[in-house]
Image: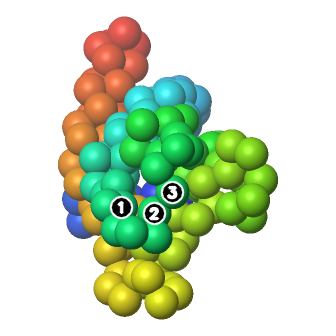
Amino acid sequence: MNAFEVDYAAIEKLEEKMRMLPNKMEPAVNTILHTDGIQIATEEITKLIRVSRSKWSVRNKTHAKNSNWSKSEEMNLGFKVKARGGAANKKGSFGYLVFPNEGRGSHNPLEQRFAERGIMNAKPKIIEKLHKGVDKVLEEEF
C-alpha cells in the first residue's frame, strides 16, 4: 500500500537531537517506528476505510475496517504497511482494498486514497513519538 517516509523539513529538530548520540539513536528510532509507528499508521488508515453499502457488496464476510487487514514490513528507519493477503478469493485476504483506494474497476469510479491520507494523518503523531523517544534517550545519557 504505502511506505512511510518522513518529510525532512518536519524533522530538522529531531535530526539535531539525533546527532548528539548517533549510535544510540538508530535503535531507539527503529523501535519506535516498528511498534508505535506501525500501530499509528494502521489505525489512521483504518479510520478512513469505508464499508460499502452498495448492492454489489458482500455482506456476509468480515470487512477490513473491522479486521486485522494489514501486515507490516520493518525496514531500517522505516516501515511499510500493506493489505494482508492477495486475490479476493483467498480466505483472509484484504487485497481488494487496492480497488477503492486507487479507484479501479467499474464499482470504484473515484480514488479514495485512504492509505495515503491515513499516512499523512499519522505523520505528526509518529514524529511526536519520535521526539519523545529521542528525548528519553538523551535524558538517560546526559
Quadrant of image for the N terminus: bottom right
Residue 119 relative to residue 26: left or right: left
> What amino acid type is highlighted by mark number 1?
Ser
Give the alpha-carbon distance from disc 3 to disc 2, as whole Å: 4 Å
Q: How is the image coloured?
A: rainbow
Give the alpha-carbon distance from disc 3 to disc 1, as whole Å: 9 Å
Give the alpha-carbon distance from disc 1 to disc 2, as whole Å: 6 Å
Q: Check if mark 3's residue and mark 2's residue have beta carbons within 8 Å.
A: yes
Q: Residue at x 35, y 29 (%)?
A: 134
Residue 63 shows in this picture: yes
> What amino acid type is highlighted by mark number 3?
Val
Residue of label 3: 58
Quadrant of image for the C terminus: top left
Label 1 Cα neighbours within 10 Å, binned few <14 / some 14-19 / many ≥20: few
> Height in image: 75 above or below 118?
above
Q: Which structural element holds mark 1?
A: loop
Q: Earlier in the sequence, mark 3 or mark 1?
A: 1
Q: Position of residue 140 (x, y in %)?
A: 37, 9
Q: Residue at x 24, y 41 (%)?
A: 125
> Height in image: 113 above or below 108?
above
> What amino acid type is highlighted by mark number 2?
Ser
Residue of label 2: 57
Q: Check if mark 1's residue and mark 2's residue have beta carbons within 8 Å.
A: yes
For residue 52, the mark is 1
Q: Which structural element holds mark 3?
A: loop
Q: Position of residue 29 (x, y in %)?
A: 47, 35
Q: Residue at x 45, y 63 (%)?
A: 57
> Height in image: 75 above or below 142?
below
Residue 83 relative to residue 46: left or right: right
